[in-house]
Image: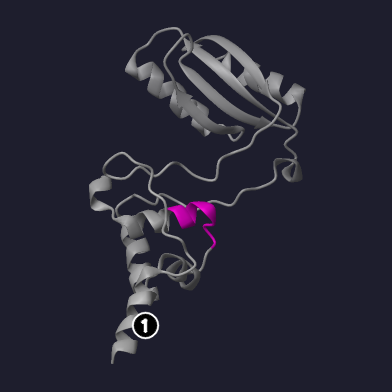
Amino acid sequence: MEGTSNLDAIDFAILEALQKNARLSNKELAAEVGLAQSSCLARVTRLRETGVLKSFHAEVDPRAVGIGLQAMIAVRLRQHSREMVEEFRHHALSLPQVLAVYHVAGANDFLVHVAVRDADHLRDLGMDAFTTRPEVAHLETSLIFEYVRSPGIPLYGPKGTVQRAAPSAEPVRRSRRRSRAAAR
């Protein structure tokens, strides 16, 4: 994956726009960042091929698909070997109820974000999928009352500052083209 030194202001503008709305057409995205459609498509392709853009997602309403409860399960391992960490991570990610796995420092080793139908489903998941694991020493479950996700991650430029896209009302490139045409 490329470092931020290989990304310019237009790349950051593309990333910011796609984080806000990954369903933008190439035409809409090009207009928003002030590029020709072919140049915009080439940049998005490069961002995908280099691993900067990892994937595109659809956000689904949990209740619409039968999810009535979300929780964070804090997991403490019996031992802190690389093998046990990797085994637990692999197991947790194989469970369909798991939304995210965080390997953390502190009293616990993992935080596992799960989505289940109800409290009985949560209890059964903890008992059947976690406490039966030989590497697990302790579980602590916290119910999530509200889950609101930020639409994207901060985009830090080469100097460590958060990059912001140029105002989309009047893209810079279009202004230059008009100026050249007016000069003729």
Q: Which residue is drawn at 75% across and 40% down?
A: 66
Dominant secondary structure of the magenta stretch? helix
Quarter of the picture containing the C terminus is bottom left
Front residue of 58/28: it is 28
In the rendered image, residue 77 lying in the magenta stretch gets the answer no
Q: In this view, does 147 lie to the left or right of 170?
A: right
Front residue of 68/18: it is 18
Residue type marked 1 = Arg
Compared with 66, 76 (above or below) is: above
Quadrant housing residue 105? top left
Mark 1, residue position:
178
- The percent coordinates of residue 36 (x first, y second) are 37, 75
Front residue of 63/117: it is 63
Residue range of the region highlighted in magenta in the rendering: 16-23
Q: What element carries label 1?
A: helix
Q: Which residue is drawn at 52% across and 21% down?
A: 111
Q: Which residue is drawn at 34% across and 13% down?
A: 81
Front residue of 54/132: it is 54
Compared with 80, 56 (above or below) is: below
- The percent coordinates of residue 114 (x first, y second) are 61, 29
Q: Residue at x 58, y 28 (%)?
A: 113
Q: Is residue 158 left or right of residue 65?
A: left
Look at the image and tell me whether residue 2 can be seen: no
